[in-house]
Image: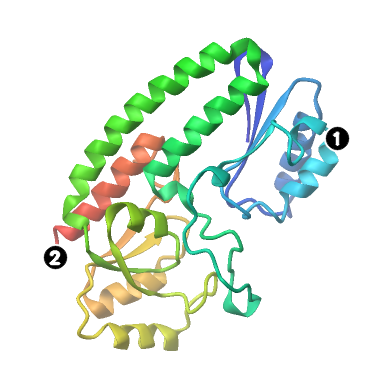
Amino acid sequence: MHKLLPAGVAFALAAPFGTLADTPSEIKALRQEIEAIRADYEARLQALEQRLEIGWLPVLLQQSGNAKVQPGQPGNFAAADFVRKLEVPSLLDRSQGDVHAAGNPHIQTDPRNIAQVAAALGGRLQQVDLAHASQYAQRQADFAQRWQQAIVRWTAQAAALKGAPVVSQHKAFAYLYDWLGMREVAVLEPKPGVEPTASHLQEVLSALKGTPVRMVLYAAYQDPRPSEWLSKNAGIPAVKLPFTVGGTEGAKDLFGLFDDTLARLLGAGAKQ
């Protein structure tokens, strides 16, 4: 999670799926991160996905002893604060599953969100590291140009997906659907974060009868069996999406993340 930037500036990255460390290797890594944030040099902290870090990040910050990365300080950067939130609940009720108070946290599935976060992050880095502000500005401008060109290309490639009815294993792709105009007609999980039972999968299958569905989607980190079951019984492709950088072999960086996502979606759609 820790990466050196120009002239010894440190940048601490909060992983989206972070949890409290519970194995020896995880505990060692957590201690190393605390020491890194505690260090003399300036630390930058970025939380990629809203509220997913709540179980471990406050502890990390408290034990770091570094005032520069505490909430409200310039060195604390929450990416989700800079994008429009989807699926913000009107009522918080834990009986409804893993409901996120601030809205759906999976903002990284829409490249337009990446552009907004990158612009905000570039500005923040210029603010906290004035000595290298011009370098950050130059790199941000270069990225923004290449990223916008890629968005135009991806959007054109994905035109055939507009209006496509799909099933999601988990509500992980709200921002992807919003960008591409796809329609989520069912979710395999009975409640967010609750694994579907055999009886619930049967209910979903019955509800889909007479409803055209293009494919069922699941993230690379998920158990594929629920999606594979629906695929077999409904006769639709089950599509694994990388969900984040490193999720699949083709998603080696941000550009590869969306190249591979669209290739998988379009490849499944072509089979219909």
The residue under the point 41% across, 69% down is: 169
Front-most of 246 and 100? 100
Disc 2 is placed on an element classified as: loop
The residue under the point 41% across, 49% down is: 109
Mark 2 residue crowding within 10 angstroms, few (<14) / some (14–19) / many (20+): few
Residue 50 position (above or below residue 99)? above
Q: Position of residue 85 (x, y in %)?
A: 49, 55
Q: Quadrant of residue 100?
A: bottom right
Q: Which residue is mark 2?
A: 272
Q: Which mark is residue 90?
A: none
Disc 1 is placed on an element classified as: loop
The residue under the point 73% across, 51% down is: 56
The Cα atoms of the two marked residues, 1 and 2, are separated by: 56 Å
Q: Quadrant of the C terminus?
A: bottom left
Residue 230 visible in this rendered orientation of the protein: yes
Q: Position of residue 77 (x, y in %)?
A: 63, 37
Q: Is residue 19 left or right of residue 159?
A: right
Say what amino acid the circle numbered 2 marks: Gln
Q: Which residue is mark 1?
A: 65
Marked residue nearer the N-terminal end (1 or 2): 1
Q: Position of residue 239 (x, y in %)?
A: 30, 60
Q: Quadrant of residue 111?
A: top left
